[in-house]
């Protein structure tokens, strides 16, 4: 299974945001002196969200490992450069 560079970046950013939000929610519950009955589910959700987001990273990591030398990414970059229009240098060089 092959993913684009944009998909990989979005998956990693989404996982990082889930992790930061989970930490923030857990810290806010502790600092707000939430009752013990409410603190346990908050901690479970705070840990579970990033775990679920991280579970989706397995295919992304696998696609990076299969393309470790970067040939596909380099080919995509060169193809994008070929699609750009060429213009003459303004000073004629």
Image (cartoon, rainbow, N blue to C red):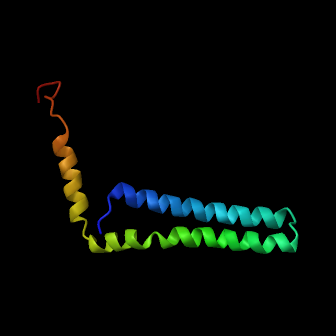
* Residue located farthest toward the top when viewing the structure as drawn: 91
Relative side of 25 to 38, left or right: left
Q: Position of residue 60 (x, y in %)?
A: 39, 68
The vertical placement of 1 against 21, above or below, is below
Where's residue 74, x and y in %?
A: 22, 58
As displayed, is residue 65 above or below residue 31? below
**Which of the 4 quarters of the picture holds residue 50?**
bottom right
Q: Residue at x 87, y 66 (%)?
A: 33
**Quadrant (top left/top right/bottom left/bottom right) for the C terminus:** top left
Lateral position of residue 11 relative to residue 28, left or right: left
Q: Is residue 52 above or below residue 78?
A: below
**Disc count in the image?**
0
Which of 37/26 is in front? 37
Residue 21, image quadrant: bottom right
Above or below, 21 relative to 50: above
18 left or right of 23 in image: left
Q: Residue at left 19%, top 51%?
A: 78
Determine the residue positioned at 28% across, 73% down: 66
* Quarter of the figure that contains the N terminus: bottom left
**Residue 27 % position (x, y):** 75, 65
Picture coordinates of residue 34 (x, y %)? 86, 66
Left or right position of 46 against 56 = right
Of the pair 87 and 63, the residue shown nearer to us? 63
């Amino acid at each position: 299974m092959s993913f684009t560079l944009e998909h990989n970046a979005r998956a990693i950013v989404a996982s990082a945001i889930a992790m930061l939000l989970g930490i923030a929610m857990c810290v806010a519950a502790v600092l707000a002196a939430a009752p013990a009955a409410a603190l346990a589910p908050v901690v479970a959700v705070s840990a579970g969200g990033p775990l679920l987001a991280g579970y989706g990273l397995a295919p992304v990591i696998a696609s990076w490992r299969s393309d470790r030398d970067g040939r596909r990414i380099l080919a995509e970059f060169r193809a994008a450069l070929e699609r750009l229009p060429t213009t003459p240098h303004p000073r004629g060089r």
